[in-house]
Image (cartoon, rainbow, N blue to C red):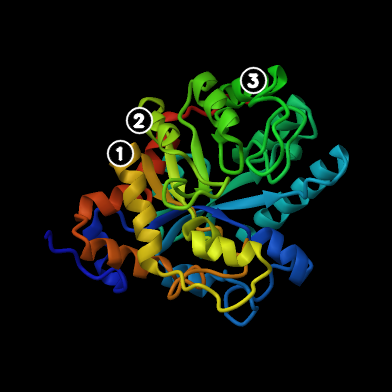
């Protein structure tokens, strides 16, 4: 086994060849809307009852964060756009409030530049195609505000794409949905296939000229939740160049937990551990390849997480677990952020 220093020791991070984690999905903006009226004050200390604050981000070795900007699926189109803009405003204010810790980023170069100054790179991802209000013009405006990915659906279908957790309507993407993907490619906005149906996954991968991402999903073979990704789609990421960022949500990791949750949480809660997350990471590696995996926690997006991984400081136990399983420093570096940085390097931002 290749000797790998403990990830829990911050002084050893450089030995991994990549000094920080780049996390694909965090719902702190939405959680702050619900519980803190979008306040950015006091997030440089703990004690807010949320999974995310600056001390926890530092403890978790997070150096790049895709902040989710979310609008509920039941909103009218104009309201969905408003909610999305308010979430973007929160992230911009959060970054501006703590300039010694946070910096806005769009490209792989921006993320690496943030690390050179000891700061956390902040990127934007809109969770749900309803965020564009059915308008390519709105998509272009969101891109101009820094949007780096758009999740094509959330938990229900949009007018142009099927969700994983709704009835099949389009069989994947409608013709307008294909236009959305093409415009995202032109703008350099990543196509995010978390939450979408398998038909939408396959359509988008076939159409997209750029690598796609799954910002927070896991493996259907290990847990057949509709939010998870089947092996044939994972295998297609090799040709596409995309990345599956494994989620830490227990119902995506464990069939026992999903059954308990769906049945109304009757009886003892099944225990989900770091090992369960590691199993999904290793299965994704086997199906997609080492160059096509990453981490997408979904912190502040669900109330429960695996043992020892209860907040954004929880990346360290996973990295240690994988090191114990024989992962080399270079392999861990690819998982921790090297692969998603390669995608950001490959996808060219349109001149606006």
For label 2, the SS is helix
How many residues crowd around disc 2 within 10 Å: few (fewer than 14), some, or many (20 or more)?
Answer: some
For label 3, the SS is helix
Q: Are marks 1 and 3 in contact (CB under 8 Å)?
A: no
| Residue 32 against residue 166 in the figure, above or below | below
| Residue 84 against residue 13 in the figure, above or below | above
How many residues crowd around disc 3 within 10 Å: few (fewer than 14), some, or many (20 or more)?
Answer: some
Q: Residue at x 36, y 52 (%)?
A: 281
Alpha carbons under labels 1 and 3: distance apart = 27 Å
Q: Earlier in the sequence, mark 2 or mark 3?
A: 3
Q: How many marks?
A: 3
- Name the spot of residue 340 as percent of width and height, x first: 41, 42
Q: Earlier in the sequence, mark 2 or mark 1?
A: 2
Alpha carbons under labels 2 and 1: distance apart = 7 Å
How many residues crowd around disc 1 within 10 Å: few (fewer than 14), some, or many (20 or more)?
Answer: some
Is residue 98 visible in the rendered image? The answer is no
Q: Would residue 29 be found to the left or right of residue 339 on screen?
A: right
> What residue would you read off at disc 2?
238
Q: Residue furthest bottom?
A: 47
- Name the spot of residue 213 as percent of width and height, x first: 49, 38
Q: Nearer the viewer, residue 182 or 323?
A: 323
Q: Nearer the viewer, residue 71 or 266?
A: 266
Q: Would residue 30 be found to the left or right of residue 351 on screen?
A: right
Q: Where is the C terminus found, in terms of image quarters?
A: top right
> What residue would you read off at disc 3?
178
Q: Earlier in the sequence, mark 1 or mark 3?
A: 3
> What residue would you read off at disc 1?
289
Alpha carbons under labels 2 and 3: distance apart = 21 Å
| Residue 199 against residue 320 in the figure, above or below | above
């Amino acid at each position: 086994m290749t000797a790998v220093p403990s990830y829990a020791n911050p002084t050893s991070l450089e030995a991994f060849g990549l000094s920080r984690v780049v996390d694909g999905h965090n719902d702190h903006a939405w959680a702050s809307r619900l519980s803190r009226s979008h306040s950015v004050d006091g997030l440089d200390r703990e004690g807010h009852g949320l999974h995310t604050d600056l001390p926890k981000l530092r403890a978790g070795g997070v150096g790049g964060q895709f902040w989710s900007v979310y609008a509920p699926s039941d909103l009218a189109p104009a309201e969905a756009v408003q909610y999305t803009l308010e979430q973007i405003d929160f992230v911009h204010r959060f970054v501006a409030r703590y300039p010694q810790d946070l910096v806005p980023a769009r490209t792989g170069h921006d993320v690496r530049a943030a690390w050179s100054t000891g700061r956390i790179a902040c990127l934007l991802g809109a969770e749900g195609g309803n965020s564009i209000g059915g308008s390519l013009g709105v998509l272009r405006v969101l891109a101009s505000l820094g949007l780096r990915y758009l999740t094509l659906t959330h938990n229900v279908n949009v007018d142009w794409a099927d969700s994983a957790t709704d009835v099949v309507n389009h069989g994947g993407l409608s013709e307008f949905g294909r236009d959305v993907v093409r415009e995202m490619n032109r703008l350099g906005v990543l196509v995010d296939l978390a939450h979408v149906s398998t038909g939408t996954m396959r359509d988008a991968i076939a159409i997209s000229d750029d690598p796609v991402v799954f910002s927070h999903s896991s493996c259907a073979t290990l847990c057949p939740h509709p939010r998870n990704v089947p092996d044939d789609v994972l295998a297609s990421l090799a040709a596409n160049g995309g990345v599956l960022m494994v989620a830490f949500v227990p119902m995506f990791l464990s069939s026992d937990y999903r059954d308990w949750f769906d049945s109304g949480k009757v009886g003892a809660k099944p225990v989900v551990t770091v090992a369960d997350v590691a199993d999904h990471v290793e299965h994704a590696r086997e199906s997609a390849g080492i160059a096509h995996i990453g981490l997408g926690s979904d912190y502040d997006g669900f109330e429960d997480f695996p043992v020892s991984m209860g907040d954004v400081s929880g990346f360290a136990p996973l990295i240690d677990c994988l090191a114990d399983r024989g992962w080399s420093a270079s392999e861990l570096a690819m998982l921790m952020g090297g692969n998603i940085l390669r995608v950001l390097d490959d996808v060219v931002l349109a001149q606006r």
